[in-house]
Image (cartoon, rainbow, N blue to C red):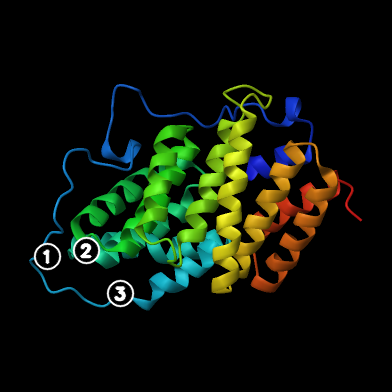
Amino acid sequence: MTRRLLVFCAAFTLVTACKKDDATQPPDEGATTAGETGDSGGEKAEPAEPEVPQEPDPPEIAEARTKVIAAEFEPATTTLEPMWKDLRDREQFRASGLAAAWYALAVVNDIAENARESAEYAVTMAEKTGDPEVVAAANIAIGSYNLGIERYEEAIAALEKAFEADRKGKDAALAMIVYSEVRISNAFGGTDQITKPEELDAAATALEKAQKIAEEQGQDVLLGRALVNRAAVARYKGDDKRACALVMQGMEKYESGGAGEWLTSGGQALKDAAMCK
């Protein structure tokens, strides 16, 4: 189930709106790669020393990150697709890892498989550098990919690793938000009904962490996303009053943060379905 569908599912009848997304198919089970787990296995390797001089991160990476966070995926994709490949070819470890991770996050919501190559490459760069920012971004990317192909255990492991890389880092809130979406998806247990309600509790706990971090850092779009996801959890639990309070707060943060239509439409659907005043 895609993350956007999670919010729309909370807006409508679970039986009809939350069946497994037939367009999302995992790759063949016979081919297992590091990208399916977010971990290459074995003992932790020491960071590799690059053989070529490392340049400062291009400022366009940070700009594209902001666009991805705001769900402005198309301009971020246009910037990052050629950039991550160029940085890869020039062996710029940190910069290529970050660019690849954010490119993966820009494309994963459309067709998850399009994110696989760049997400796996980002994980490789995280292992090479040991840089906390690269580790966080790379594992959010591979976690999002695994969410997209419904490999929830692998996604959970990667997103926990992303959060642990830097619990107060600028991407810690995003790690917990995506983690909550995996838990919400897992609550369905492969059916069209909530069969694992404890997963909703795990999602709620993660979202409380995400909300606190986003508030402290002044990241309004991420704060809005945490609030809207909390509203979805409340609606899944049958508490429309609480869902309304949370989604209204979330939509306000979306507006102040300049969130894109991909995010605001989900929040609006939830607000309308819960008949929030």
Instruction: Work out whether 251 lies above or below 1.
Output: below
Image quarter (top left, top right, bottom left or bottom right) of the N terminus = top right
Question: In this figure, which residue is indicated by the disc labeled 3?
Answer: 57
| Residue type at the position of mark 2 | Phe
Q: Which image quarter: residue 186?
A: top right
The x and y percentages for residue 230 are 68, 50
Q: CA distance from mark 3 to mark 2?
A: 10 Å
Please state if 18 lies on the left or on the right of 218 as rendered: right
Q: Tell me, for residue 93, which label it has, or none.
A: 2
What residue is shown at x 81% (from left), y 41% (from top)? 239
The x and y percentages for residue 261 are 68, 59
Q: CA distance from mark 1 to mark 2?
A: 7 Å
| Residue type at the position of mark 3 | Asp
| Local secondary structure at mark 2 | helix
Question: In this figure, which residue is indicated by the disc labeled 1?
Answer: 50
- The answer to whether mark 1 and mark 2 are in CB contact below 8 A is yes
Q: Which image quarter: residue 163?
A: bottom left
**Residue 2 at least partly seen:** no
What residue is shown at x 65% (from left), y 70% (from top)? 258
Mark 3 or mark 1, earlier in chain:
1
Depth order, front residue of 241/84: 241
